[in-house]
Amino acid sequence: MRKPRCGHIAPASSKVAEPTCLRNARVRTVISLPPGERLSCWTLIKRSESHSTRLFLPQPVPRELVNEALALAQYAPSNSNIQPWHMVFASGACRDRLVAALIDEAQRRPPNVPPLPASFQHFRSELGAQVYGAMGISREDTARHAAAVLRNWEFFRAPVAGIVCMHRDLGPADALSVGMFLQTLLLALTERGLGSCVEVSISGYPKIVRAQLAIPTELSILCGLAIGYPDPEFPANKLHIAREPIGENVVFLDN
Ligand SMILES: Cc1cc2nc3c(=O)[nH]c(=O)nc-3n(C[C@H](O)[C@H](O)[C@H](O)COP(=O)(O)O)c2cc1C
């Protein structure tokens, strides 16, 4: 079953100190870029069809690279120029405490993430089959499956754990603006050799996140953002998650 079509029926006619390992989305091999060299904008955008990182190396993330990426993301457009994104980053001991508390909670009860509507659930199943399949884990292998899912709340071992927030009184247009900020941030991080994973799973334990990071109640917790250097040996980091042809998402109405 494909997603509902909402009534439309017409078909759609900085610097880097050392050589940086980056995935080239087109040829799908890991390439080494010389110091200071960057991937093109279009190669970076194809990042979106290349990979989220689901296992990171312990290698620390230089703060200046994250700051550079954030400064670029700050140019994202937003409704009434509100710039509604609010990011909280935890690293070091703070990140470790957050992860310990999240893992403890995740072992006690399921996350409070709203279920997908039935007609969209096949997307999650198909994705899960690819992601866990790449790790050699079948659906029936419940123990290994649960252990792999649990890594969500470890931020997939990323040394930088981000929390993406927005004021609770803002609405869908502002959430769109946060999304534009996030995509720009992901691309800028990728350009700097850093991997990332956006994680709605983190928002499933808002009380824990708030308590650990002193996030006030006027901020809604939208998702997490894991940032670090991808483990090049981890099979699920090499996945190619396909995209729909644009005709599934777009209609042109000319007459
Ligand atoms: C809003 C949002 C929430 C996501 N939440 C999760 C998550 O909780 N866990 C996870 O492993 N991936 C999560 N992802 C990553 C998506 O699964 C991934 O972007 C999608 O399958 C496309 O794959 P790609 O990023 O590798 O191209 C999320 C992505 C977005 C944009």
Image (cartoon, rainbow, N blue to C red):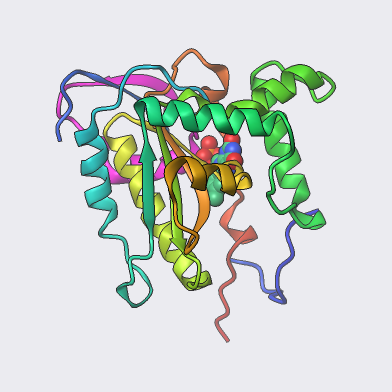
Q: Is residue 129 magenta?
A: no
Which of the image's four quarters has the C terminus? bottom right
Which residue extends farthest top?
233
Specify whether 66 is left or right of 208. left
Q: Quadrant of ligand 1?
A: top right
Measuring from the top left, give residue 211's x and y in whole percent.
50, 44
The span shown in magenta is 26-52
Measuring from the top left, give residue 251's x and y in whole percent.
59, 70
Which residue is painted at 58% across and 79% down in the image? Answer: 253
Which residue extends farthest right?
140
Specify whether 96 is left or right of 120. left
Measuring from the top left, give residue 135's x and y in whole percent.
65, 18
Specify whether 211 is left or right of 132. left
Which residue is painted at 68% across and 21% down in the image? Answer: 147
Residue 65, located in which quarter of the rendered image? top left
Q: Nearer the viewer, residue 33 or 136?
A: 136
Residue 154: tell me if it is visible. Answer: no
Relative to 57, residue 90 above or below:
below
Q: Nearer the viewer, residue 152 or 128?
A: 152
Number of numbered discs: 0
Which residue is painted at 37% across and 56% down in the image? Answer: 86
Relative to 86, residue 92 above or below:
above
